Amino acid sequence: MNITRRHLLKMGAMAGVGLALPLGTLSVPVGRLGASALVRSPRVEPFTVPLPIPPVARPVHSHGGADHYEITQRVARQEILPGLKTEVWGYDGIFPGPTIEARRGRQAVIRQTNELPVPVSVHLHGGKTPPGSDGYPTDLILPNGPGGSQTAHPHGGHAPGGAGHRGHREYRYPNEHRAAALWYHDHRMDFTGPQVYRGLAGMYVLGDEVEDGLPLPKGGKDVPLMICDRTFGEDGSFYYPSLDPTLQEEPGVLAHAANGMLGDTILVNGAPWPQLEVSNTMHRFRILNASNARSYDLVLDPPPPGGRPFVQVGSDGGLLEAPIPHTSIVAAPAERFDVVVDFSRYPVGTKVTLRNLRGEGRTSDVMRFVVARGKKEEASVPERLAPDLDFPDPDDVEVTRRFRFIAGVGGGMSAINGEVFDPGRIDARPRLGSTEIWEISADPSHPFHMHLVHFKVLSRDDGPPGPYDAGWKDTVSLEGGSVRVAARFEGWRGKYVFHCHNLEHEDMMMMANFEVI
Amino acid sequence: MGTEVYDRNPRRLAAVLAFVSQGIHLWVLPGQLAAAMVPGIFFFLVAVGQGLLGASLLFGGGRWTARFGVLFNVFVVLVWLFTRAVSIPQLFEPIKLPVEGLGAAATFVEVALVVSLMRPGRSLRRKKRLDRA
Ligand SMILES: [Cu+2]
């Protein structure tokens, strides 16, 4: 009798302490992960909001071959979803930030002032920029006043080790390369994902005389399309699953988003599923995938008679030598595609939807064009776009390097060649002026981005380059498999990063340094 | 009923150590699982194992309880050592900084637990020899 009672007590204790207590504790994070994964944005009727065009920044003064700009990064409230206000962290308080229209050969000097509560770093993506202005992840502009800690608990215990400017600093962009659609965005170590997500991104369109001389669509028919995805809370706030939503202490995201935060609402130029009225003429679209992690396979629905709606005229690094027609445009995060769409192939009155074949439900729509009126065609796409692109000669290659990108599992770190980002470790030392081949392999999918250089994709999976690898690139999409790229390390000596442009991977340390020596 | 007669105190000590290890793993579990699943799930399983072990030991436990306790804690200590010796950041990071000190404390407790479980085993064998003699 005594033994039975004792056994019952023992069983009860084992069940309580050994099972119920751990399960109860487990329910806390599981509930947090589940609630986060289930956040859904307020419903928006697609194709009701007109496509906004970000304002063009005006220089505060221009002299000595340089245009000087002043941009203040600040918190503001903006109507993104109709009827709701969203707190954005924006360049000049707007999302997307003001477009900078730069000219080849004219320096742009941008004084960035940080009125946000966190450190920032500004990177001109695709820019060939001296190291001091490249927006190195620890080269921070600290906020004014208190709360200016750099990174309280950096990943892996590495001290950030970067210089901090307090309040403001100047970035100098020489603009010595060919006309191209670039973009600028935040690059703070460990926190790039949430800070770009809150709005720190803008277009930077570099023009030159070669481009001016082409009969491509111009003026109002040359339209930037910054495509990104966001999830919103019920009150219209951006929803991002940071472990520390103040972005002050613990970096990283809840485990369900560690392989990329995918939003349920598609924004173009900061508007949800917008609509653009066009004349039945050619339009040039500077498509930028500014999403943290989402890739798109863009098609027009209905397709124009005869198919191949997109004529690609440019890539990340500017104009192609010759146009390439595409049925769809597959764009990984940070890639740009400069395309011309000829709306004369549609009858006036047609509604043409830009769809994303990789989306599901609401994310399979992007925006809509309404062919609203007839107009005389003034533009054309010439057979030859840019003079010889002067790609690197494989015979000049001095060094071949291999980098393997492997994503973390369930919240683990993402690593390059098994190593996580350490600002103090240099993984490649290319000589100034040298040409190198870099072989990148990826598991599973990573958009590979290099600072400073543009590269030429030589091969993909040991075969020819893919349909979206043409021209000069600074970001190339890997979906498993491998690519070989050739780059010439020109311009400046110094330390730069290369990394995965899935921003959650980047923040989970999928980044490394090269130093041009 | 032989084991109950002379091994109460070492078993009670072992139970307390199991509960301490469980407590440490439960303390870090919510933050760890939210950020990284693999270490989070491992911490959960350790908490379950230590809880079952501790409760069983509290009520005397048997030879199989002691064997399970030794093997289980040796395994947990080896995993801790392995993940410190070999870097597999894709699986085991981010290990949060405060966890590191607690991890060392938990490991110390687990080693003590293994020792305390092995001593009663030795005394049991000695008792048996004495009984036979
Ligand atoms: Cu990646």
Image: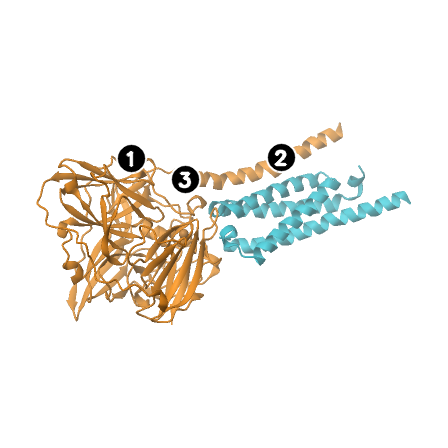
Chain colours: A orange, B cyan
**Residue under the point 57% across and 54% down:** B83
Q: Which mark is on residue B59? A: none
Q: What element carries label 2?
A: helix
Residue A37 circle label: 3
Find out whether the residues at labels 2 and 1 contact each other: C-beta distance under 8 Å: no
A335 with respect to B17 (left or right): left
Tell me how far mark 1 sits from mark 3, CA to CA: 17 Å
Task: Tell me which chain the residue with mark 3 is part of.
Answer: A
The residue at the point 43 percent across, 56 percent down is A509
Q: What element carries label 3?
A: helix
The CA span between labels 2 and 1 is 45 Å
Question: Which one is earlier in the sequence, the residue at label 2 or at label 1?
Answer: 2
- Quick check: can you spot residue A44? yes
Q: Position of residue A106 (x, y in %)?
A: 19, 66
Is label 1 within 8 A of ligand 1 (CB to nearest ligand atom)? no
- How many residues crowd mark 3 within 10 Å: few (<14), some (14–19), many (20+)? some
The answer to whether any part of residue A154 appears in the image is no
What amino acid is at disc 1? Arg
Report which residue position mark 1 lands on.
A43
Asked whether disc 1 touches disc 3, contact meaning CB atoms under 8 Å apart, the reply is no
Amino acid type assigned to the residue bearing label 2 in the image: Ala
The N terminus of chain A sits in image quarter:
top right
Number of marks in the image?
3
Residue highlighted by disc 2? A15
